[in-house]
Amino acid sequence: MADETTDAKGTTGYLLELGMLKRAKRSGWWIAGVKDPETIAEHSFRVGVVGAVLAMMEGADPAKVALMCLFHDTQETRVGDIPHIGRRYLEAATNEKVTADQVSAAHPAVRGGVQRVVEEYENGSSLEVVVAHDADKLECLIQAVEYREQGYANVQNWIDTSLNSLKTASAQALAEAALSMSSVEWQKTYLR
């Protein structure tokens, strides 16, 4: 019984830690002048949905992609959201190491499962991994388009680098569509 209690507390501690992602901002947007950027959790949620959609379009496993997408930035509870320019000056622990520390007290199945998901996202080469990485970049591009629409002019670099890093035809097509639409164009489906 003591092990079950210990495992439950360790696992719950991990879940509580992930709650920090709902409060932590994506700091790279501050460089572009965005005063109140999205949180890491907001980003991760849409990356998960984008990943599932891309997986459906590319013939990959949507559940596996969405799972990788949901866990791809969870390490930022420990190291923060280090913008790309900051990575030139800092050497953070690998996401695999951070994840191992985060889940070290969790239930063994959770510990192993989360570590496998992060390991695959960071080091795998399957179609699901490619799609998950595209989902991260495509979500960043969509967010940049939304910020640009709100008057933040300094986001073009985020759009360009995200667009140039997309690997799948589906992600490239969705990116091109996003660049040609307004963020409220979806309303036309019910405003007809």
Image: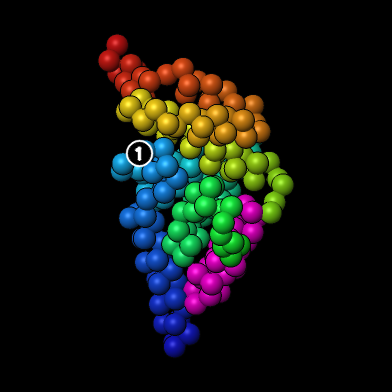
156 left or right of 113 in image: left
Front-lying residue, 126 or 167: 167
Find residue 160 and report its horizontal and vertical position in percent: 55, 29
Residue at point 59%, 26% (across, down): 172
| Amino acid at pointer 1 | Val
Magenta stretch mostly in which secondary structure? Answer: helix
Front-lying residue, 63 or 155: 155
Residue at point 54%, 72% (across, down): 101
Q: Which residues are magenta?
A: 95-122
The 10 Å Cα crowd at callout 1, few under 14, some 14 to 19, many 20 or more, is many
Residue at point 64%, 46% (across, down): 129
Which color scheme did the rendering employ for the protein? rainbow
Figure quadrant of residue 24:
bottom left
| Relative vertical location of residue 16 with respect to residue 33 in this rendering, above or below | below
Figure quadrant of residue 114:
bottom right
Residue found farthest to the bottom: 2
Q: Quadrant of the N terminus?
A: bottom left
Find residue 182 and report its horizontal and vertical position in percent: 38, 20
> Do we see residue 171 in this rendering?
no
Residue at point 46%, 17% (across, down): 180
Find residue 139 and report its horizontal and vertical position in percent: 48, 37
Residue found farthest to the top: 192
Residue found farthest to the left: 191
Instruction: Identify the element where label 1 is drawn.
Output: loop
Residue found farthest to the front: 89
> Do we see residue 13 in this rendering?
yes
Q: Residue 59 in magenta? A: no
Residue designated by label 1? 34
Q: Residue 108 in magenta? A: yes
| Relative vertical location of residue 153 with respect to residue 28 in this rendering, above or below | above
Q: Quadrant of the C terminus?
A: top left
